[in-house]
Image (cartoon, rainbow, N blue to C red):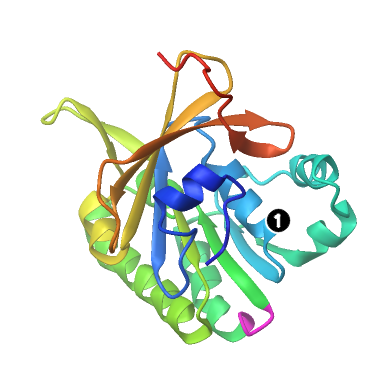
Amino acid sequence: MLSTGVKSLDELLGGGIAPGVLTQIYGGFATGKTTLAVQVGLLSRGKIAYIDTEGGFSPERLSQMATARGLDPEEALQRFILFTPSDFKEQRRSVGGLKKIVDGTFSLVVVDSLTAHYRVEENRRGLSAELGKQLQVLLWIARKNSIPVVIINQVHFDSRAERMKPVAEHTLNYRTKDILRLDRLNVPGLRVAVLERHRFRPEGGMVHFRITEKGIEEALSGENVE
């Protein structure tokens, strides 16, 4: 298990981010998805393979988080192995290439996000199978190396359901065993994490957390979350 750095969130997840499975973290813009994924990697001891499809990974932010936690920012930066595919085809190559790169020195794989390039493709229906293949490769990596793989996902408005739903929901939900949704609240810096599915924890549990210079932290006791 890898810790999120937030005790209540670890407890919600049954101890942390689990090895050998795909964990999906999804939510709207600026809900803390990238910050959470980076923090899990920062607090781990090994290398992190980070596929950044949206340009959201910030070395400056990582350095800020490391420094605020009393960690060596240079050492932290060296542990993050960054891949920046510019389209869906490059993403496929990046994911496939991980099979030769990830070994026992790695503690985490992150894809942030898996669906950004997929969303802009015109023939998305035909690419669903390819998305499934990428997830299968990532699951193989998670199992072979007994490490967690975090899949960041975006949301879209489903007019039929009249609510926000994860992109490529059926394809991703079929292969991701633990699913965490992040939402913004009216209080600046405050977020809520909702456990939508888990292998052994009850669904629907939630915890509040803050986004700070350290990354994410426990919500303050008595903080207004309405």
Q: Position of residue 190 (x, y in %)?
A: 53, 23
Residue under the image location 41 percent in, 81 percent down: 140
Q: Is residue 119 visible?
A: yes
Name the residue tied to disc 1. Answer: 42
Q: Position of residue 198 (x, y in %)?
A: 30, 57
Residue under the image location 49 percent in, 52 percent down: 10
Above or below residue 7? Residue 91 is below
Amino acid type assigned to the residue bearing label 1 in the image: Leu
In the image, is 108 to the left or to the right of 15?
right
Above or below residue 81? Residue 155 is above
Of residues 118 and 51, the one drawn nearer to the viewer in this rendering? 51
Q: Position of residue 155 (x, y in %)?
A: 35, 37
> What is the chief secondary structure element of the magenta stretch?
loop
Residue 20 sits inside the magenta stretch: no
Label 1: how many Cα within 10 Å (few below 14, some 14–19, many 20+): many
Quarter of the image for residue 20 reads bottom left
Q: Which stretch appears magenta?
A: 101-105
Residue under the image location 38 percent in, 47 percent down: 180
Residue reaching furthest front? 221
SS of the residue under disc 1: helix
In the image, is 21 to the left or to the right of 103?
left
Residue 102 sits inside the magenta stretch: yes
Q: Position of residue 159 (x, y in %)?
A: 16, 27
Total marks in image: 1
